[in-house]
Amino acid sequence: MLNKEQKEAIVAEVAIVARGAHSAIAAEYRGLTVEQMTKLRQDARTAGVYLRVVRNTLARRALTDTGYACMSDSLKGPLVLAFSKEEPGAAARVMRDFAKDNDKLVVKVIALSGNLLTPGDLAALATMPTRDEALSQLLAAMKAPIGKLASTLQAPVGKLVRTVAAVRDQKQAA
């Protein structure tokens, strides 16, 4: 049993993490073994996801003054909270990948930047590009018009060179 100070510490810790998180997921873990939960925690740690099993009343208190207060009404049953600290899709990827092999993990609530999503949006959130992928896509999009302009400017010069070479070959053959 937790005493008042321990409960306050948990609420404060979860609230700090929630304020800095990009997305949050609450999933029911009923029926998972200790080994499976340990694997989930390891996967989350590797992906930079904060994972915590918290009593729902404490979770509601922790989420009150954060952008994830919208999740409070949906916190029912044994839930594990996952917060993406570095990129929005990290927690969704961890939950999606873990749920593929463990059907007892059921996503109940998803929130992205304070907006409540349906559990069906897990796949869409999981496929969001990482920061590095998004930057490379942006750079590729910015580079394409410049490359096209360069090839367009080069085309007349190349055509002239080919024409001169064809005239030269024609004169040499004659």
Image (cartoon, helix red, strand yellow):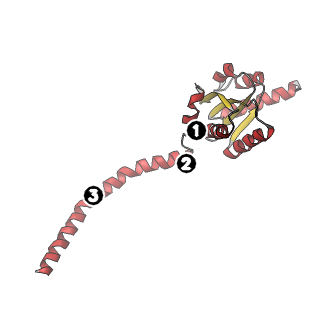
User: Which residue occupies 77% across, 21% down?
Assistant: 57
> Considering only order in the chain, which callout, 2 or 3, is on the residue closer to the N terminus?
2
- Asked if 23 appears above or below 138 in the picture, the reply is above
Q: Residue at x 13, y 80 (%)?
A: 173
The residue beneath circle 1 is 126
Q: Residue at x 79, y 41 (%)?
A: 35
Q: Is residue 80 left or right of residue 6?
A: left
- Residue 162 image point, x, y percent: 21, 68
Q: Residues within 10 Å of mark 2 (few under 14, many from 20)?
A: few
Residue 123, quarter of picture = top right
Task: Name the quadrant containing residue 99.
Answer: top right
How far across and how far down the image is residue 51, in percent? 73, 36
Image location of residue 130, percent across then percent down: 56, 44
The nearer-to-camera label among 1 and 2 is 1
Q: Secondary structure at mark 2?
A: helix
Could you tell me residue 127's position as x and y percent?
55, 40
Q: Secondary structure at mark 1?
A: helix
Residue occupying the point 17% across, 72% down: 166
Residue sitting nearer the eye, 118 or 140: 118
Dots 1, 3 in contact, CB < 8 A? no
Describe residue 124's horizontal placement relative to residue 6 as left or right. Answer: left
Vertical arrangement, residue 144 with respect to residue 51, above or below: below
Amino acid type at circle 1 is: Ala
Q: Is residue 58 left or right of residue 25?
A: right
Residue, disc 3? 153
Amino acid marked by disc 3: Leu
